[in-house]
Image: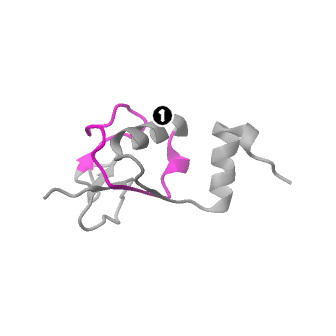
Amino acid sequence: MPPTRLNIGCGQKPLADAVNLDISATVSADVVHDLNVTPWPFAADSFDEVHAYDVLEHVVDVIPVLEEIHRISKPGRPLRDRSTLLERKRLYRRHAPSLVRLE
C-alpha cells in the first residue's frame, strides 16, 4: 500500500512511510517540486495527513499552498504544521494582516 502521508519541504529529514517532497533534488525527497507552482503533482484526496515542518514561512504566497494542501488531503484530515511564533507572526502579517494584532 502506498504511503498516505505527505511531508512537504522534507529537506534532510524525510519521514518513514511518507511521500517526502522538497524543492531540492540534492536531499532525500521522493518527489522534487516547487511548492509555489500549482497544481502539485498529486491527485485530489490523496493523503490522510500532511506534514509541513518549518516550511510555510518560506513559500511566496501561503494561500495557494494551503489551498493545495486542502485539495490533496482527504476530507477532515490534519495538517501538521510547525513554525516558530515569530515566523507565524511574519507569515500572518504578510498574508493575512487583518488576523494579526501585534502589541
Image quadrant where one finds the C terminus: bottom right
Left of 41 or right of it: where is 50? right
Quarter of the image for residue 18 reads bottom left
**Number of numbered callouts drawn:** 1
Q: Residue at x 26, y 40 (%)?
A: 42
x and y percent of residue 85 in the render?
66, 61
Q: Residue at x 55, y 49 (%)?
A: 57
Q: Residue at x 36, y 58 (%)?
A: 10
x and y percent of residue 47 in the render?
30, 50
Left of 61 or right of it: where is 22? left
| Amino acid on which the number 1 mark rests in the picture | Pro
State how the image is colored.
one colour
Report the span colored magenta. 31-59
Quarter of the image for residue 96 reads top right
**Which residue is nearer to you in this view: 17 or 56?**
17
Residue receiving disc 1 = 64
Residue at disc 1, secondary structure = helix
Image quadrant where one finds the N terminus: bottom left
Q: Residue at x 21, y 58 (%)?
A: 3
Circle 1: is it few (<14), some (14-19), or many (20+) Cα within 10 Å? some
**Which residue is nearer to you in this view: 83 or 42?**
42
Residue farthest toward the right in the current orientation of the protein? 103
Residue 9 drawn in magenta: no
Principal secondary structure, stretch drawn in magenta: loop
Residue farthest toward the left in the current orientation of the protein? 1
Residue farthest toward the front in the current orientation of the protein? 76
Residue 48 drawn in magenta: yes
x and y percent of residue 54 in the render?
50, 58
